[in-house]
Image (spheres, grey):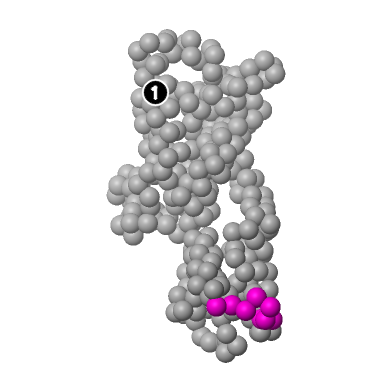
Amino acid sequence: MSWSPAEEQERPRTTPVVQALIAINVAVAFLQATIVQPAELSSLFAFREGPLSQTWWTAFTYMFLHAGLLHLALNMYTLWIFGPRLEALWGAKSFTVFYLWSGLGGAVFHSAFGGGVPMIGASAAIYGTMLAYAMQWPKDEIYLFAVLPMRVLTLVCLVVAIDLFRGVVGGGSTAYFAHLGGVAFAFLYLKKPQQMSVDQLRQRVSPAPDVGDDISPRASPRTSRSRNRDEVDEIVAQSKAAVAKRAPNADVGKPQPSVGESHAQELDRVLDKISRHGLSSLTASEKRLLEDTSRQLRDR
């Protein structure tokens, strides 16, 4: 797999958590190949059915063991392809929690449908990462086998369908249902309310600057649906800068113009809505408000 030129320019090369995950997996593979017998590591850290109260850590440690170099290379390459942009968008902590949560989903599904076979490999967490990327940037294009152009969402739907089919008909020792568990848990994670509360969002946002009484509706160019939180962060940063610039000259005891107050309240309401439901929940007029505010702040 490789990105089309347009997506390659936007994708971060690497990020700290992705680097750390790859390094840990490679280090464990080195131990398996040199110092410690693979069977010993598997007996301690592979996930298998049994009393989890005695081996609870295996629900997480199994995803750092791999059955050979090819297994390791495929998983780590896929993580390197899809992980950095998600981590750059969410932050290191949120991405780490999401990755481990998806891996836990693999353990849960394997326990329910795996038939008692010990399981190793990061595939469940990788499948969750692929789904998250596809839901965030569904129209991004990737080259399968470096030749066949395919949208990311199409690729994810294809591999999930193949794993579901193989899991139902029986496909050898591969834990196909664990892969589906990673997808299912990732979907639940992505559909829950965003981690950032309204209060946390308000702490990031200075009071919206008074952009003047002469605000009037005006046409704005059609924008892409793939607009993400970076635009909101840009508005927040510009808002803070504008407030800092005008603060020395502001009259503390002087009431603000009513239009400015109304605009600030409306902007705050829109940011609250983004925090609860995401950018996709905004109406056309609310998107225009963000676009106009961003443009006005840039002009100032």
Instruction: Identify the residue shown where x is 53% and y is 39%.
Output: 96
In the rendered image of this protein, does residue 133 appear above or below residue 74?
below
x and y percentages locating residue 116 in the rendered image: 61, 19
- Among the 4 quarters of the image, the one containing residue 54: top right
Q: Which residue is mark 1?
A: 27
Q: Nearer the viewer, residue 261 or 119?
A: 261
* Quarter of the figure with the N terminus: top left
Residue segment shown in magenta: 249-256
Asked if the magenta segment contains residue 255, the reply would be yes
In the rendered image of this protein, does residue 5 appear above or below residue 247?
above
Q: Is residue 164 visible?
A: no
x and y percentages locating residue 212 in the rendered image: 57, 85
Instruction: Identify the residue shown where x is 60% and y is 65%.
Output: 206
Q: Please, what secondary structure does the residue beneath circle 1 have?
A: helix
Q: Is residue 53 visible?
A: yes
- Among the 4 quarters of the image, the one containing residue 179: top right
Asked if the magenta segment contains residue 33, the reply would be no
Q: What amino acid type is highlighted by mark number 1?
A: Ala
28 displayed left or right of 2:
right
Give the mark count: 1
Taken as a whole, is the magenta stretch helix, strand or loop? loop
In the rendered image of this protein, does residue 196 appear above or below residue 83?
below
x and y percentages locating residue 197 in the rendered image: 67, 54
Label 1 CA crowd tier, 10 Å (few <14, some 14–19, many 20+) = some
In the rendered image of this protein, does residue 209 appear above or below residue 4?
below
Instruction: Identify the residue shown where x is 50% and y is 68%.
Output: 241
x and y percentages locating residue 293 in the rendered image: 54, 76
12 displayed left or right of 62:
left
Instruction: Identify the residue shown where x is 36% and y is 15%.
Output: 33
